[in-house]
Image (cartoon, rainbow, N blue to C red):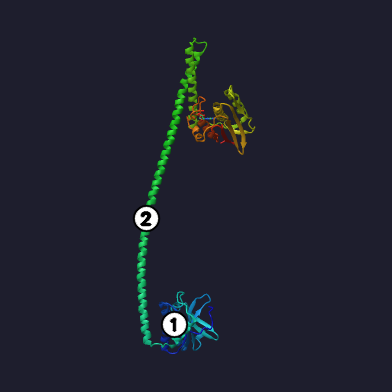
Amino acid sequence: MSTVPDRPPLLQMALRVEHDIFVVRQRGREVAAAVGLEHQDQVRVATALSEVARDLLGAVGGADVTFHLDETPDGRRHLRVDLLPVRPLPDGRYEPQSGAVARLVDSLGTIGVGRDTVVRMSRRVPVTAQALTPERLAELRTELGQSTPGSALDELAAQNQQLIATLDEVREQRDELAVLNEELQETNRGVLALYGQLSEELEETNRGVVALYAELDEKSAQLRAASESKSRFLANVSHELRAPVTAIIGLGRLLADSASDPLTREQAQQVELIRSSAADLLTLVNELLDLAKAESGRIEVNWSEVDLRPIFGQLRGTLRALAAGRPVELEVEEPPSATLRTDEVLLGQVLRNLLHNGLKFTERGEVRLRAHLRDDRWVLTVTDTGPGIAPELHDRIFEEFYQVPGVTRAGGTGLGLPYARRLTTLLGGTLELASEPGRGSTFTVTLPVGGA
Ligand code: ADP
């Protein structure tokens, strides 16, 4: 331990006879108290010192005892007691008789000082102890030097006092410990109760969540069943309706046939009305049947490598008539020659549907079909210069039977777009709309090159 050297000792005294053991003990306690050790530590130092003193008196006939206050450069202080034996120690070593002695101080052992071997013990002074100025130290030296040591009886009485005080302290600590234990147990009980409560609440919540999921599952099963039965109903009804409606159209045609009995003008008009109404009805029934089939997954996709050019050619040929006599152009651009894996009939239906709508709703300008490849997708667009559709209706027009109010150009069922979107989904693609009122519409079908 590095220390500030050459400080004179606080006190020195000789240990030569048995009575000196008491004196060493007493002085040890006084010095310990003077440098700021706490009560318990004062007793420890005094006890250790009297034990070592007894050992040395017995072994070598005494020692010169010096008390020092050391201070390390980092400001820590230690009370150090050196006992210089009056004769050399046997084997130059010292072991306390009682092993417990060493535990009373921070360090205890022999150390070479010049040619001598000294028994040294030290105890740390708490940082909270008041620092001692050089003046105070000098004062202390004088005080300690002047005070006369008491008798052995005085020391015994002092020891008894210390013992009683220590016992009191121990009892107080035990009581404090008991209180602390009690509190700890109380806290533990509280924690356990809280834990139990929390687990119960958690279980309760879990049960709630499980029940909620079961309910959700049940609801979605019900919804699925309802939607399936709706599709089945639609499919059945439209199927059943198709035969009589077709019969009405056939009979109407027969009635109007020139080979049949001639009709009056009025009768001919009525028969024509019956025929056109029946034709509208048949369109509706067919579209309903298609949609119901698509929804119930009863449409089979026939995948093959498809060349778009013939499909586009056919659309150009069959739909041009719809623009005839009006200031509207149908522009079907020549598609890239690469093939696409899809169902050509279903794709044809989707495009026809979109072009048909474009031609139906566009008064003047053009309806254009264009196809190009972007990355690994085919992008097919149907653009028109028609009235356009307000953004808030972009989702609605894909709902069954929805038609934008106020769009006059006749006819339609409101089933074309939902059907087209269904088919596109079946083909593994998407159908999107970009449109604004007054700016025309663009319907975009995007399909994967390699099919779904
Ligand atoms: P339908 O054409 O038989 O009425 P659709 O499902 O094909 O039914 O279309 C739904 C509605 O969306 C149409 O009634 C129309 O109001 C609107 N719509 C569809 N295509 C266009 C378009 N190209 N331009 C403007 N409005 C359109």
Element marked by disc 2: helix
Q: Would residue 40 be found to the left or right of residue 87 on screen?
A: left
**Residue at the right extreme, as displayed:** 337
The label on residue 196 is 2
Element marked by disc 1: helix
Decide: is 209 above or below 392. below
Q: The disc labelled 2 sits on which kind of residue?
A: Gly
Sort mark 2 into few (<14), some (14-19) or many (20+) by Cα contacts within 10 Å. Answer: few
Sequence-first tag of 1 and 2: 1
Q: The disc labelled 1 sits on which kind of residue?
A: Val
**Residue at the front extreme, as displayed:** 438
Spatial CA span between label 1 and label 2? 58 Å
Q: Is residue 297 visible?
A: no
Where residue 264 appears, as percent x and y from the top left, is 48, 10
Residue sitting nearer the eye, 451 or 124: 124
Where residue 342 appears, as percent x and y from the top left, is 58, 33
Tag 1 residue: 31
The part of the image, by quadrant, that contains residue 163 is: bottom left
Decide: is 7 above or below 357. below
Where residue 276 appears, as percent x and y from the top left, is 49, 19
Q: Nearer the viewer, mark 1 or mark 2?
A: 1
